[in-house]
Image (spheres, helix red, strand yellow):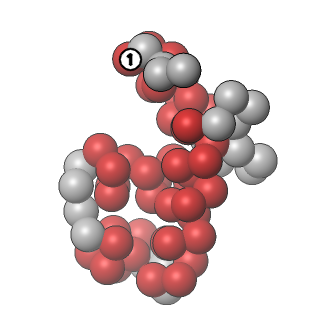
Amino acid sequence: MKAGGRELAARIAALAPELRDAVLLVDVLGLSVRRAAGQLGVPLARLCECLARGRAGVTEPGGAAP
């Protein structure tokens, strides 16, 4: 089932801050993962982990664990 705009925004807003930041920078603003990691001051591997967990939280019915 696809989420509507408001539902999608609510799911993103409900993410833990580090997961939300990763999703917003990469998937919404279109930054590369390297640039997003630099912007957030985190290692690339950490950004990728947060991005994967954040995406799962947005797309899976139950959301992501914080």
At x 53% / y 49%, what residue is drawn? 55
The answer to whether residue 17 of the structure is visible from this angle is: no
Which corner quadrant holds the N terminus? top right
Q: Residue furthest front?
A: 1
Q: Which residue is mark 1?
A: 5
Vertical order, 23 against 42 (above or below): above
At x 31% / y 79%, what residue is drawn? 34
Residue 29 locus on image (x, y percent): 24, 49
At x 56% / y 29%, what residue is drawn? 11
Q: In the rendered view, does 13 fall on the left or right side of 22?
A: right
Residue 9 locus on image (x, y percent): 45, 25
Q: In the rendered view, does 17 fall on the left or right side of 2?
A: right
Q: Residue furthest left?
A: 30
The answer to whether residue 11 of the structure is visible from this angle is: yes
Residue 30 locus on image (x, y percent): 22, 55
Which amino acid type is marked by label 1?
Answer: Gly
Q: In the rendered view, does 56 fall on the left or right side of 3?
A: right
Q: Residues within 10 Å of mark 1 (few under 14, many from 20)?
A: few
Closest to the observer: 27 or 16?
Answer: 27
Closest to the observer: 39 or 45?
Answer: 45
